[in-house]
Amino acid sequence: MRKWTIGLAAAAGALTALQAQAATEIQWWHAQAGALGERVNTIADNFNRVQDEYKVVPVFKGSYTETMTAGIAAFRAGKAPHILQVFEVGTGTMMAAKGAVVPVHKLMADTGVPFDPKNYLPAVTGYYSTPDGKMLSMPFASSTPVLWYNKDAFKKAGLDPNKPPKTWPEVGEYAKKLVASGYNCGFSTAWFTWTQLENFSAWHNVPFATKANGLGGLDTEYKFNGPLQVKHIQQLADWQKDKTFVYGGRDNLGNPKFIGGECPLYIESSAGYGSFKAGAKFEFGASTLPYYPDVQGAPQNTIIGGNSLWVMGGHSKTENKGVAEFFRFLSLPLVQTYWHAYTGYVPITTAAYEEMKAVKFYNDYPGRDIPIIELGGKQPTENSMGLRLGYFAQARDIMYEEIENIFAGKKTAQQGLDEAVKRGNVLLRKFENENK
Amino acid sequence: MEKRVVFHSRTLPYLLVAPQIVITLAFFIWPASQAVVQSVLTQDAFGLSTKFVGLANFEQLFADPHYLSSFYTTVFFSTSVALLGISSGLFLAVQADRVIRGAMAYKTLLIWPYAVAPAVAGVLFLFLFNPHLGMFVFALRSLGYDWNHALNGPQAMFLVVIAAAWRQVSYNFLFYLAGLQSIPKSLIEAAAIDGAGPMRRFWTIIFPLLTPTSFFLLVMNIVYAFFDTFAIIHQVTKGGPGDATNIMVYKVFRDGFVGLDLGGSAAQSVVLMVIVIGLTVVQFRYIERKVHY
């Protein structure tokens, strides 16, 4: 009797092993550390639980840069993962790598997995699509800049904590009042180039670069030295004198300024929610990005940051089918609402957003819908669909350098932005030549 | 019986140096030659299209005024790091050598920072000098000095030099301490009996006898400052403000690994390699003559 039970157990074990072997493995290389990494694992685990044909294996590969470099090195060695997570800055490079990636619309058509691009929020997918709307990569973690503000500081300065500033003149007015009430800094921002040049241009419907910000072709040129951008940057430079504006450093190095209560008005990604919630010892709120009311059509819509999932080429049909099935799973409202609720990233489908509204999520967590309102408020124009610019990481470095020259008083806004455009265009021409 | 230190076998010496040769070939010569090859090509990130462009990558580099300013920044940075690191290492070694009680504890503590990776050293100093919550910034502010290395170029440079040199002090300390301990005590005692004071003894006896160590450290520190410091720059300033701390090796890293401009980045690393080889040759030809072995 005992022998028999053992035999059965062994047989069952062998059967499970057989099943596990039969499942096609899908490698998913990603850059989500810590709590976000656990959310990624939960999503993969659930996919593996609801079906047994495919097994998605998430692998953490380090920072965004490290993950992308690892993916590219693996491709060059003929061992590319099936799914590679790439940050938005790398989008231009990935789009140009025609032989290395399988566009999502083609993957879905080839594998016959149901897919309707109309189900997705256009402001999110626009960034990762061709100008005629064909999706190239699957948006995953998408955020957009919002204006965070310190409600306690507002009360201290005699401002209404439920009335954040809507326009740039109001930001100036509020910031001056906050400085007058004892703060060392009125307003600051993270990711300066992303929030104050890229998104600023889209939000005011002015071009950041020609050819629909590069979506229309590689022969694009930077245009962020237009009169509106110059006016804005010069205004910020002037505001430095009385601490109405304080430059916080590159990327999000300035975040302690907001969390530590030094700067009560702060523009940062909607994904900053988690770290603000964990670190801030005051009540804070979120609002839409400020705009200049005298600009026709403003506010338009913002553009996203974050990352998307690229399908790497060179894999079998079965494996590609697995990737397509996984993408269908990812797009389910249940998965999207989970991701949105726990991370501060936006949902990528309209259905998920509707569901969040239906369960009154935004009544309980006010401000969490700000990024969706900013992204989806209007039909995106060619100035606000997204960016596709070669060597964009270096271009952002150049913008930072010139912006810092402006804020250090070495150049005027016009001189600094002109120089950044000139230097950025050299990179664009180089990229164009290499990808002809 | 005569004691001979000569190999009788012809193959044995080659076998004994073979592991070192293999490692040098695999980890130094091969990557370096790859960099040279890559520097005359333009290639997209995925290696799908490769074009031979001759010296075009170099021409672009030297036509860029920002690259030339990065060269001067590097010279200033490396000289400062090497001088600061070496002089502090020497000073501490001389002091530690004279300590009688608890010498081991002092020595251990002084060697410690070398175990800290450059990136971590960068983060440490970033916290100490953080414009919002740094201890030093707080102290400086109370003295009426406004510290903001996010916009002040010289302050940013000062910060990365300190962070880069701090770690190197331990390394220099270790070698100087060994150098000091190999100086015969009788020599110093004889000088003392002849009436030479501590300063005189240091400059006429100890320092000249340390020149081989100083020379070795000069080469090592320059190489360190040129190649190993990009992590500090990456953590602390990212090359800014403006291009105040954009040293050449950081630009190689940014352009190659972040920007995926392989040809341009390879050309820069070839330039860097040529500079360091040149510097080392100069050091051996001209400075080594002044070294007393």
Image (cartoon, coloured by chain):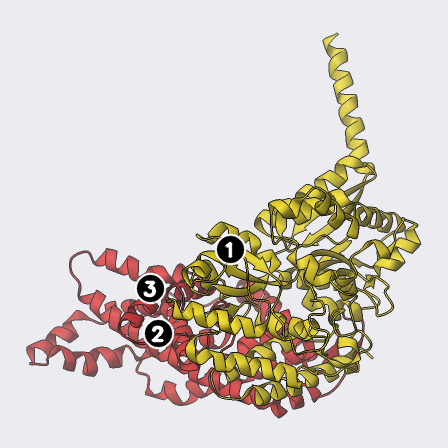
Q: Amino acid at mark 2?
A: Gly
Tell me the quadrant of the picture where the C terminus of chain A can be found: bottom right
> Can marks 3 and 2 be said to lie on one chain?
yes
Judging by colour alone, the chain drawn in red in this rendered image is B
Q: CA distance from mark 2 to mark 1?
A: 46 Å
Residue A331: image location, x then y, percent:
78, 49
Chain A rendering hue = yellow
Tell me whether circle 2 and circle 1 mark residues in contact (CB < 8 Å): no
Q: Is residue B9 visible?
A: no
**Which numbered mark, 1 or 3, is in the foreground of this view?**
1
Q: Is residue A263 left or right of residue A93?
A: left
Residue A284, labelled with which disc?
Answer: 1
Residue B135, labelled with which disc?
Answer: 3
Q: Give the chain of mark 1.
A: A
Q: CA distance from mark 1 to mark 3?
A: 27 Å
Q: Give the chain of mark 3.
A: B
